[in-house]
Image: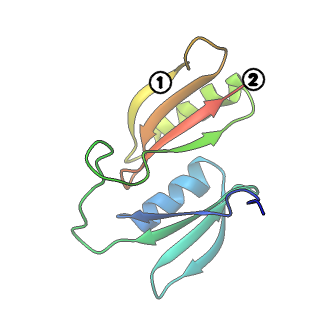
Amino acid sequence: MATAGVHHFGLSVSQLDATAAFFTDCLGWKLAREVPQYPAKFVTDGRAVVTLWQTEAGAAPFDRRKHVGLHHMAIQVDSAAELASLFEQVQAWPGVSVEFAPQPLGAGLARHCMFFEPSGLRMELIWTP
């Protein structure tokens, strides 16, 4: 018996609408489903699905060095040019905080950047040749 890949990631967010808009309007993902009673929104790029779940008011932000949980979410892009172009959109997006701009990942040809989206989730864009 073996697994067949990741089905989806469920993320708790403090700003559901802003985070969903970041995925759909900035990254070009599609809204796949909503659950207004929770509330929650599900977004997809056609391959991956991310479920976004609204936290209660006053929820404590995640600290990757002090809490067990998601360190960051990495999203692959198809080229170094696409990484640079998408990073320009990301860094200009309201509520985004950039950790670092696209740079080499180690000694290889891969490049990546890190940032925090509007709810404070740490994210990475990565290109691997």
Q: Is residue 18 above or below residue 34?
A: above
Which element type, helix, strand or loop, lies under badge 2? Answer: loop
What crowding class fits label 1: few (fewer than 14 Cα within 10 Å), some (14-19), or many (20 or more)? some
Q: In percent of the image, x 34 and y 71: which residue is there?
A: 55
Q: In percent of the image, x 44 and y 52: which residue is there?
A: 70
- Image quadrant in which you'd find residue 97: top left
Q: Position of residue 44 (x, y in %)?
A: 67, 60
Residue type, numbered disc 2: Pro
Whether residues under marks 2 and 1 lie with C-beta atoms below 8 angstroms apart, the answer is no
- Quadrant the C terminus occupies: top right
Residue 129, numbered circle: 2
Q: Position of residue 77 (x, y in %)?
A: 69, 36
Q: In percent of the image, x 52 and y 38: which residue is there?
A: 124
Which element type, helix, strand or loop, lies under badge 1? Answer: strand
Report the side of 114 relative to 48 (left or right).
left
Which residue is under mark 1? Answer: 101
